[in-house]
Amino acid sequence: MNTGSQEKKIFILDTNVILHDSASLRHFANNDIIIPITVLEELDNFKRGNEIINYHARKFVRTLDELCGDAIFNNGVEIGPGLGKISIRLDEEMAPEIKKSFSPLKKDHHILNIAYIVSHQNKEQKVVLVTKDVNLRMKAKAVGLLAEDYTSDHIKDVSALYTGTRIVEGVDGNLIDRLYSEEEENPNLSELALNEPLKPNEYMVLRSANKSALATCDNQQKLITRVEKRAVSGIIPRNAEQIFALDALLNPDISLVTISGKAGTGKTLLALAAGLEQRNLYRQIYLARPIVPLSNKDIGYLPGDISDKISPYTQPLFDNLGVIQSHSREGKNAPHYRKMLEDKKLVISALSYIRGRSLVKIFFIVDEAQNLTPHEVKTIVTRAGENTKIVFTGDIFQIDHPYLDSHSNGLSHIIAKMQGEKLYAHINLEKGERSELADLASNLL
């Protein structure tokens, strides 16, 4: 989505752009925006409900109402200072080039038709169809139209995304010895020759010629502190990144943690283990994941009550609980997980059934966060109350949401935006720990 050129463009928005970001009309600089009437009809179907997309539908329609009145159907109205105009375009008879290739029964094709007609009526300007639907973009290009994704909240270079850790080579062996010594003071951060300043809550693997240590820095960013390996709820971390993740999850000064990594790296398991370890510090432990149906029917079509409907989505969370239970069964302080579930001290649910609850003194784990939009992630974080800790886990390269990718999902967004904040820590887990076979499959298949 290129809005930076001085040549004034006309952007035609698809419904999914608005459902992704109701403020999208303010992100097209001084270019003009056209909303096909079909889009308003589709938004009408989304106005009722408690999901984020329902909020966006209502918000956008209210914004249009505030902006315009009747004038919007004529020459459009100004969106705001430095911005272009917005107008509604009524449906028109299918252009012959569109009609011969595409069925008029599909709403998408009516939006495509408007884009096609507008482009031919405004040949002196660039007309761009903006949609998050890859298939519709391909159809537009097939009939000679410009089509782009909505990218105002995209992360440009995912390969350069903050990992939360770094390896520091050539460290003085005496400095590492001091980290392990109980008698000497911790080394000062200035003693390390770092290429870039250390971010708050960033972790380090320090290496000398024949020694190494896992470390981070104190809250004042002055002293280097060693990160120790420790078992949590019977779960023992197996690599440096897992040790770092548990340190962040158990740190009371860090209110927001994100853990990314491919399947089998232990993201959800570590988060749940840390929450259960600290169960006495929180009123409740919430473990939730977004529902992303793999067909165009939502869970209302599934048989049974709410528990039956969401069971396929929450079962992996119960599987992780079972792993922890098997590891901690013999411990004297092993929590009674079944009783915690019965007493609602531990809540495992689909994310949509947790929205609206008060997040005060909660250890809140959101699994599969890569299937959330940036706005959904923001909504969750901004609802955090006093003494609440929020943990997002997910794999930014394994997206199930039809209109998100590794650049536009909420997990990538929060990692890019929150790095360097004192209340935030991020760890990217790289090594799979389920089994050698699972790791091989994750890398090759």
Image: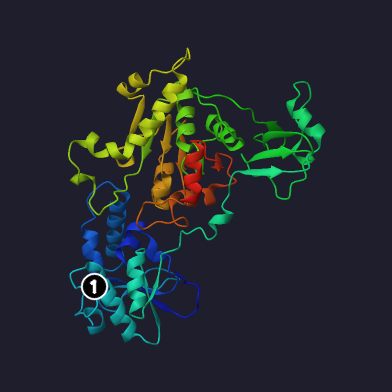
Q: Is residue 252 above or below residue 28?
A: above
Query: In the picture provided, is 352 more to the left or to the right than 7?
Result: left
| Spot occupied by residue 172 in the image (x, y as percentages of width and height) | 81, 37
Examine the rendering and report whether any part of residue 188 can be seen. Answer: yes
Residue type (three-letter) at the residue carrying disc 1:
His
Residue drawn at (43%, 65%) of the image: 27
Instruction: Give coordinates of residue 267: x percent, y percent.
Output: 48, 37
Asked if 147 appears above or below 265 in the picture, the reply is below
Q: Is residue 284 visible?
A: no
Q: Where is residue 144 in the image (x, y as percent from the top left)?
A: 36, 81
In this picture, residue 120 sits left or right of residue 271? left
Q: Is residue 168 left or right of residue 156?
A: right
- Quarter occupied by the N terminus: bottom left
Under circle 1, the secondary element is helix
Return the x and y of residue 61 as percentages of the image width and height: 27, 61
Mark 1, residue position: 110
Outermost residue, front side:
437
Q: Residue at x 42, y 74 (%)?
A: 31
